[in-house]
Every structure is written in C-alpha cells, then in structure tokens.
C-alpha cells in the first residue's frame, strides 16, 4: 500500500467528510504546499487551480505568514472575544485602509457562513424588518442560517430553514430570459433591475431588511454583473431604506484584480462580509465590515452574537501578515495582469471546444461552462450534479497533476494570485487536453 493510500485509509476509518456520501469520497493525501503547488504523501505534485477552496490567495507555504503565526503564539495564543489585543487593534486599522469608504468597523468570526449570518442579524436589528432578498444562484455558507440564505440546491436538505428569505433571479447573461442578443450591459442591467424592483414591490419594501448578494457569484458559475447593475441595486436600496449586504467571502483580497469585488463598480455596501483570502486560509477567520449607520445602532443596542473563537489573536496575526504579503508582492496587480492572460486562454479554449458554452472570468476568478450543445445550451451535467463526464474530466486532470473544482457542468479556474504566466499557460494546456472528454460526450449526444 502506498503512503497516500495508507493515510487515506486511516482518515476514512474515523473521519466524516463534508458535502459527500462517505463511501464516495476520493481525497488526496496532501502533505505540503508551496506557491501554486501542493504534494501528496507519495511525492506527487499538483498545480492548485482552485486555490483549494478558492481561498489560498497568496499561495501555499508563505514563510512570512507562518512566522507571524508562530510569533503570535509566543506572545499570546488566545484571548476571549471580549478582550482587546494588540493584533486586534492593528488589524482593524489595516483593514480600514483597504475596505470601501465608510466601512471602518469590523466584527470578527471564524467562517464566511457565520459572517453572513451575523450580517443578516445586524440588518434585521438596524431596520426592524425581517425579510432578506437573496439570489437563486448563490452560496452563502453551510451553517443553518447561511444555508437558508443560499439559493442553490445545497439548501434543500436543510429546509424549511430560517424564515424571511425571498429568492430573486441572477443577472446571468448566458442563461437569463431577460437577455436579448445584442443587448448592451446597460440594457440588460436595466431589465434585471426592473425585475428586482417588481419583486421588492410585491414583497413590500417596508418588510425588507436587506438585499444580500455575492458581488460576483462564485461556485455557481462566476456570474459577473453587467455594468450598472450593482449601482442600480445600491440606488434601489437607498430609495427604500433597505441595507445592501455584499458577500465578498470569495471575491475579497485581490481575487478579482481589486481589493474587493465592489471596487470594480465603485459601490459601497452597508455591510460587507469576508473570509477565505483574509488569512489566505492559513487559519480560520471572517469579518463583517459595517458602516456608521449599522455601528451606531449597536452603540446602545446589544448585538446578540459572538463565538468563543471570535477575534482569535493567532488568526488575526495570520490576517495581518497576509495583507502585508498582498501589498509587498503586488498580488492585486498580478491578479489583474494574469487575469488578462486567463481571459485570453479561456477564449482560445472556447474557440476550440464545442463542449464549451461560455467562459467567464474577472481577475483570477474564472469558470468554464460545459454544455452538450452550444445552440440549446443543455448543461453537460445535471443541476444537482452527477453523471460520469465531469468525474472523468476531474480524474484526467488529477492524473496529469492538476487539481481544481468541478461541479455540475462548471470547471473552475481560480489559481493562487502569485501564479506566473508560464504556470498558467502550462496548466491550461492540460485543461485543454482534458476537455476532449467533454467534446466527445457532447458529440455523442
């Protein structure tokens, strides 16, 4: 038995894996990582085309972050959430230098899911309203509240969920019935906004606490809003005194070629959630950024929320060091530059492969949407996942040293922000070869 097989067998004997039927899990026995690569227990190297869970933004094994965690452990390993620590003060100051204007107060948690739950608690407390509008193609976390806020099928097993969640459509140009061939961004955005306002009217603006959006939809297909859409949602919220919550758990900290996704559209939400890239996942940490209106409400009103590990000093130290690395290495700029290369490679793949229906990317957040037929746009795999084609593509990529996230009919391209052009081109050449499997399946149908 190989070292990987032995380690996997030991883990499967006692571990319960997430998002899986336990007999179907097929993990990699990961033992170390460096830059854009990681290695298994047998010494095999993989290019991390998904930054693990779209989170290792600075790359694996950065000694600057590791040493900062060690130093914090020597100074102070833990302090309760009611304590003030040096690192807590410093991180608040540092975050305020990069968040959109007005978002200068931060509540710390441990995951994107709890960040989104706390954001909704805050919005309901400030407004005295209970409804939250969230999109169908969204994912906001796996805790009971955040999975209720999620729009995709992953919420079904937890329903009925929390009350007050209202679904709204996505500005999904490739599949939206509102999009007409030749539409400008302004045309499409306007139709989406008119539809959204109609829903707001039907629900009653006076009952809606917040509209919760992934600034750019993540795992459900990297749906990039048309120019004017986010600005229009902001204006709609202002008009009806509804709070705008932007989920930047995946899009924050350089992933889109800006510090935060909202920066592309110069929009400041009332509340913004973040995690993943905040520490580059070296340790678990989330933050909810709020403006003065939200913060001032809780000056005199109790906020009923918090966790034992809120503002954990070692996690805060990891965040401070991660932000320093992003600044020192100009990873936001590199995401812009390599994002242009990724978009070019996507276009080349689409021109070559009949199984590709659409390609979408912003910075180094990318996705290839696979179909059985380009004209009908029939997905290559069902909405809830399954089929044998996507697993075969994943197996080919793994066999050739590429790890990424394939789900439904989507192949994600989200490398660490430290990726070089050579690494990106070499990896996407392997993806190109793997897509012959999708082409064959599309042709056979």
Image (cartoon, helix red, strand yellow):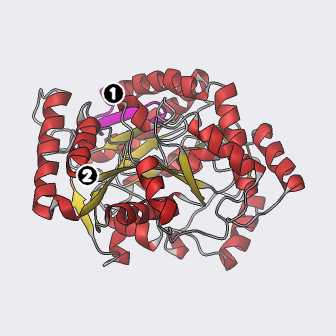
Q: Quadrant of residue 63?
A: top right
Q: Quadrant of the N terminus?
A: bottom right
Q: Mark 1 points at which residue?
A: 352
Quick check: is 354 in the magenta stretch?
Answer: yes
- Number of labels in the image equals 2
Q: Which of 171 and 52 is in front in this view?
A: 171
How far is disc 1 from disc 2 in space, using C-alphas? 48 Å
Quick check: is 413 in the magenta stretch?
Answer: no
In the picture provided, is 90 more to the left or to the right than 214? right
Q: Residues within 10 Å of mark 2 (few under 14, many from 20)?
A: some
Could you tell me residue 75's position as x and y percent? Answer: 88, 53
Could you tell me residue 262's position as x and y percent? Answer: 40, 37
Checking the image for residue 442, the label placed there is none
In the picture provided, is 17 more to the left or to the right than 242? right
State the extent of the magenta-drawn residues as a range: 350-365
Q: Name the residue under label 2.
A: 241
């Amino acid at each position: 038995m190989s070292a990987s097989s032995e380690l996997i067998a030991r883990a499967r004997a006692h571990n319960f894996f997430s998002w899986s039927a336990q007999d179907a899990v097929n993990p990699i026995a990961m033992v170390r990582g460096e830059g854009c690569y990681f290695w298994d227990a047998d010494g095999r190297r993989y290019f991390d085309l998904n930054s693990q869970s779209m989170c290792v933004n600075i790359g694996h094994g950065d000694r600057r972050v590791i040493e900062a965690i060690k130093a914090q452990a020597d100074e102070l390993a833990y302090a309760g959430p009611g304590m003030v620590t040096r690192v807590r003060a410093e991180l608040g100051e540092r975050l305020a230098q990069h968040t959109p204007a007005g978002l200068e107060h931060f509540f710390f948690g441990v995951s994107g899911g709890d960040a989104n739950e706390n954001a909704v608690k805050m919005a309901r407390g400030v407004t005295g309203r209970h409804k939250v509008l969230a999109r169908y193609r969204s994912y906001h976390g796996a805790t009971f509240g955040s999975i209720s806020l999620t729009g995709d099928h992953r919420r079904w097993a937890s329903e009925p969920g929390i009350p007050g969640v209202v679904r709204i459509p996505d500005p999904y140009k490739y599949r939206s019935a509102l999009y007409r061939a030749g539409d400008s961004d302004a045309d499409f955005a306007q139709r989406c906004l008119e539809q959204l306002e109609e829903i707001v009217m039907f629900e009653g603006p006076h009952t809606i606490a917040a509209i919760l959006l992934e600034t750019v939809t993540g795992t459900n297909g990297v749906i990039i809003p048309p120019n004017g859409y986010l600005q229009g949602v902001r204006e709609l919220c202002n008009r009806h005194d509804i709070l705008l919550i932007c989920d930047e758990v995946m899009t924050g900290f350089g992933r889109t070629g800006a510090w935060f996704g909202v920066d592309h559209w110069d929009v400041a939400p009332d509340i913004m959630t973040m995690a993943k890239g905040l520490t580059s996942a070296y340790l678990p940490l989330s933050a909810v950024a709020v403006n003065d209106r939200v913060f001032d409400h809780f000056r005199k009103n109790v906020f009923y929320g918090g966790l034992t590990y809120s503002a954990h000093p070692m996690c805060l130290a990891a965040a401070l060091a991660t932000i320093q690395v992003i600044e020192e290495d100009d990873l936001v700029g590199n995401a812009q530059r390599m994002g242009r290369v990724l978009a070019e490679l996507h276009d080349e793949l689409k021109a070559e492969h009949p199984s590709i229906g659409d390609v979408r990317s912003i910075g180094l957040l990318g996705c290839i949407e696979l179909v059985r037929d380009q004209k009908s746009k029939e997905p290559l795999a069902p909405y809830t996942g399954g089929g044998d084609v996507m697993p075969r593509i994943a197996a080919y990529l793994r066999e050739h040293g590429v790890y990424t996230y394939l789900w439904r009919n989507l192949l994600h391209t989200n490398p660490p922000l430290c990726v070089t052009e050579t690494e990106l081109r070499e990896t996407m050449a392997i993806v190109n070869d793997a897509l012959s499997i999708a082409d064959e399946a599309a042709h056979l149908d």
